[in-house]
Amino acid sequence: MRQTLHAVTLVVPDYDDAIRFYTQSLNFSVAQDIDLGDGKRWVRIIPPGSNAGSLLLAKADGAAQQTAIGNQTGGRVGFFLETDNFQRDHTAMLACGVEFEEEPRHEPYGIVAVWRDPFGNRWDLIEFT
């Protein structure tokens, strides 16, 4: 048996702003962008070099979803971007204006630093040892 995690929903205030950030600042690719009507879209983005696992960008609909933007995981780091070269990607992200909460740190499992996307979601950039 084989299973993969296809997508995780990320609630955002605007599809195009989110696409712009993830593609221009992080070099993600748009895997799908399908108009579903009534202002809704099926937008999946994937990190460079990845073929499994994606983010499904979902535009907030209503007050409850608006409130969840940037706090979907209760303030915890909820997303983990694995890299094969921490220094390269950390440097590139800083150059694109990505805000890190801390300096890179070495942990028993690898090098890691917490950053936030422009919507407030906390992420780890991590290179495993």
Image (cartoon, rainbow, N blue to C red):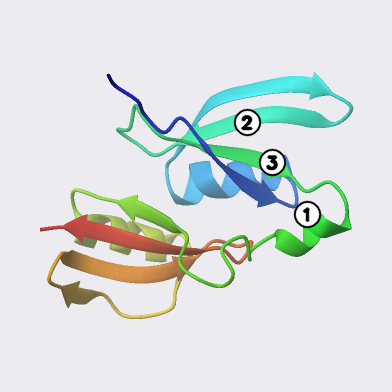
Cα distance between the residues tagged 1 and 2: 17 Å
| Type of the residue with mark 1 | Gln
Q: Secondary structure at mark 1?
A: helix
| Type of the residue with mark 3 | Ala
109 and 46: which one is in front? Answer: 109
Q: Is residue 129 above or below residue 75?
A: above
10 and 32: which one is in front? Answer: 10
Q: Identify the residue position indicated by label 2 in the image.
A: 43
User: Which residue: 26% across, 68% down?
Assistant: 112
Cα distance between the residues tagged 3 and 1: 10 Å
Label at residue 35: none
Q: Is residue 103 above or below residue 49?
A: below
Q: Secondary structure at mark 3?
A: strand
Q: Secondary structure at mark 2?
A: strand
Of all residues shown, which one is farthest toward the bottom?
102
| Type of the residue with mark 2 | Val
Marks 3 & 1, CB-CB < 8 Å contact = yes
Label at residue 58: 3
Q: Identify the residue position indicated by label 1 in the image.
A: 65
Considering only order in the chain, which callout, 3 or 2, is on the residue closer to the N terminus? Answer: 2
User: Which residue: 68% across, 20% down?
Assistant: 34
Residue 117 found in image quarter? bottom right
Quick one: label 2, few (<14), some, or many (20+) residues within 10 Å?
A: many
Residue 102 found in image quarter? bottom left
Marks 2 & 3, CB-CB < 8 Å contact = yes
Residue 12 location (% of width, % of height) = 69, 51
